[in-house]
Image (cartoon, helix red, strand yellow):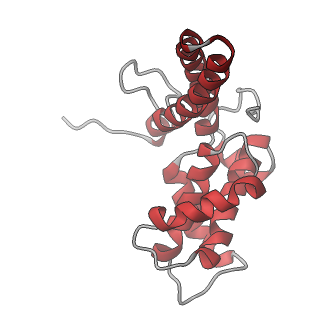
Amino acid sequence: MAIEHTNTDRDQNSDPITGEPGAHPIGVGVGAAVGGAAAGAAAGSMVGPVGTVVGAIAGGVAGGLAGKEVAEHLDPTNEDHYWRNEYPNSSYYDPSVDYQEVGPAYQHGWESRAKYRDRQWDDVEPEIAHEWDTRRGDSKLDWGRARPATRDAWERIDRQMMGEGADVRAASRNSDSEPPRVPK
């Protein structure tokens, strides 16, 4: 007997171990790594090696929770579907460049937003541009041509996190939930 999976099942992002809805292992992992490193370094500089370990653990937990919050707004399948349909409507659309070429730029944008969750585009663009060569996959776009799509995807996640526009209403999984908060 085949088990039928619905969109509701997929949208719950169930934890693979506990089955609890709202699991986002990538966002939590990125948040834990970034938060743990920052907190560990700060604690270590104040109280030494023991403080570094304690700080890394505490920062990992806090960072993981912040990463999960960003990931709540990120469903790679939905993002890809959205951009596949939106690309022809963009100001930088080029009929000679199909979605297979520009898709990795969108993905780089939404994933970079999760990675640099507490920073602004203008502050991290040089890093994002530098990462493009390793993130582009088979895309032949140089950074100048990939940049507009990358930034569009970054800004879409920002809008979702701030609760603006139709993007958020479409992505809302539970109308009874509180509005999303922007991590500090």
Which residue occupies the foreground of this view, 53 or 33? 53
In the shown orientation, is residue 74 left or right of residue 8? right
Task: Give how far across and how far down residue 105 sits, in percent.
Answer: 55, 66
In the shown orientation, is residue 119 left or right of residue 79? right
| Residue at 49% in and 32% down | 29
Task: Give how far across and how far down residue 53 sits, in percent.
Answer: 52, 15
| Residue at 76% in and 35% down | 182
The extreme bottom residue here reads: 96
| Residue at 53% in and 36% down | 30
In the shown orientation, is residue 80 left or right of residue 87? left
- The image quadrant that residue 43 belongs to is top right
- The image quadrant that residue 124 belongs to is bottom right
In the depicted structure, whether residue 137 falls above or below residue 174: below
Task: Give how far across and how far down residue 142 sits, in percent.
Answer: 55, 78
Task: Give how far across and how far down residue 150 sits, in percent.
Answer: 63, 64
| Residue at 57% in and 63% down | 130
Tell me the quarter of the image containing the N terminus. top left
In the depicted structure, whether residue 74 falls above or below residue 95: above
The answer to whether residue 3 is visible is: yes
The answer to whether residue 81 is visible is: no
